[in-house]
Amino acid sequence: MDERTTAADARAFEQFTLEEIRRRMERTAAVCVGLFAGAWIIGRIALAGQPLEGPGRLWLGVLTGVAAASWLIFRYLPLAGRRPLVFALVMHTATAWGAAMHVSRMGALDSPFFYVVYTLPPLSISLPLRLRARILMTLAGAGTFAVTYFARSPAYLDHPMIHVPMVVLTAVTVISVVLGHNVHRIMRDRFLFGRRLERQQAQLAAHASRLEREVDDRSRALGDLATALESATTERADVARQLHDDLGQLIVGVRMELAHLERRLADVPAGDGPKLDYLSNVVETLDGSVRRFIDRLREPRSLPPLSRSLEELVAPLRARSELALSTSVRLETPLPPREREAIYRLVQEALTNAFKHARASSVRVSVDGDARRVTAEVVDDGRGFDPRIAATGYGLRGLRERAAALGGELDIESGAGGTAIRLHVPLAPAPRLEASA
C-alpha cells in the first residue's frame, strides 16, 4: 500500500473484493450447472437403456447438484457474502472431487478425459484474491483431484507416462497463480485510482462551488457599492443644491442690505459711521467658501487610471483560479466618467460569465481608443453560448442599455471556439474656443 492509499481505501477495496468473489462465484456456479446438466442429458441420450451407473453418468448428476447448491448459496445465503472465500474453497474442492470421481470411471490418465484436471487451476484466475489465498485455492482444486483420482485408481501411479501430467499440471498451476496475482494487482490499482479520482472530482466540485459563491458575493457587493455610490452622488447633489439655494439667497440679501446702508451713510463722515468694509469682506469670504464647498460636492473625486482599475478587477480571479488573464489599455486621453463606467461594467460582466459559465482557460481584455472613439473587447476560449438566449439575461441587457445611452453599440460573437464581447462608444469632441471679435 503506497503513501497515497489511505486506510479507508484499503477497507473499501477489501469490501469490494468480498462482493466481487461472491458475484463471480455465483456466475461460475450458474455456468457449471449448465455445463454439467447438459453433459448429463447428452449422456442419458447417448447411453439410453443402460443403468444409471453407466460411465460417469452418476457423477455428472452429482456435479450438477454441487453446482446448483453452490449457486443457491452464493445467491441467497447472507453468510456467503461475508465469507465468500470459505464457500468458494468448498465449492472448488467439491467440484474437483466430483470431477476426479467422474474421470476415474472414464479411463486411465492417458485418456482425453483426464485433461479436465488442467482446467482446474485457471478457474481462480479471475477471483480478486491475495497471494496466499490464491495459492491455497489453486492447489486445493488440483490437489483434491489428484488425491481422489489416484486413491480410487492406485494402479495408475505405475503408469509409464505419469510424469507428463505431473509436469503439465505443475506448470499450469504456477502460471495460474502468477497470472491471477497480476490480475488482482491490476484490479486493485484500478479500484484505488477510481477512489482517488472520485475524491479529486469532489474536491474540484467543492472548490468550484466555493469560487462561484465568492464570485456571487463579490458581484452582490459590487452591485451594493454601485448603488451606494449612486445614492451618495444624489445626496451630494441635493446638499449642493440646498446650499446654493439657501445660503446663496442669504448672501445676496446681506449684500443688498450692505449696499442699502452704504447709500444711507454716504453723507456721514468716514470717521463717524460704521465700518462697512469689514462686513463686506466677511460676506465675500463666506460666498467664496460656500462656492468652493458646492463645487466639491458637485464634481466627483478623481478616479484612478482605467488600466489600474481593470488590473485590480482581474487580480482576485487570477489569484484564485486557473484562468490566464491579460489586460491591455491604450488610450490617448482619459475617458469621461460615464464611458469609463460602461467599459468597467462590460469587463466585469464578461469576466463573471467566462468564470462561471464558459469554462474558459484564458481571457484577454483590451481597451483601445482615440479622441473620437473607444472600443473595449473581452475575448475568452470557453465553450460559448447562444447570444439570442443570453440576451434575455439581466447582465447583457444592462450592457446593451448602457451602450445605447452613450450612443454606442454592443457586439457579441460566440461559438464553440469561445466568446468575444465588444463595446464601441463614440466620444464627444472637446469644445472649441471661439476667438473674440
Image: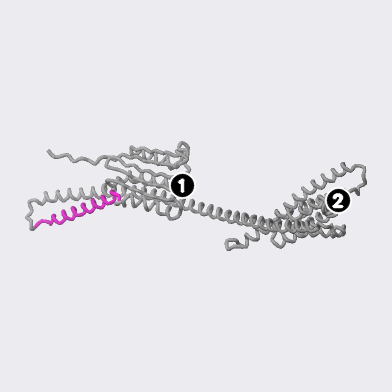
Dominant secondary structure (helix, strand or loop) of the stretch shown in magenta:
helix
What amino acid is found at the position of numbered circle 1 in the picture?
Ala
For the residue pair 248 and 160, the one nearer the viewer reads as: 160
Say whether residue 287 is magenta: yes
Q: Is residue 275 above or below residue 252?
A: below
Q: Quadrant of the C terminus?
A: top left
Relative placement, left or right, of 362 versus 268 is: right
Q: Which residue is mark 2?
A: 106
In this rendering, the label closer to the viewer, 1 or 2 = 2
Picture coordinates of residue 427, whole percent (x, y): 29, 40
The label number, if any, that marks residue 360 in the structure image: 1
Picture coordinates of residue 361, whole percent (x, y): 45, 48
Picture coordinates of residue 17, whole percent (x, y): 69, 56
Relative placement, left or right, of 125 versus 44 is: left
For the residue pair 286 and 228, the one nearer the viewer reads as: 228
What amino acid is found at the position of numbered circle 2 in the picture?
Met
Q: Residue at x 41, y 39 (%)?
A: 412
Relative placement, left or right, of 339 versus 420 is: left
Which segment did they paint magenta?
272-300
From where the camera sits, is residue 278 visible?
yes
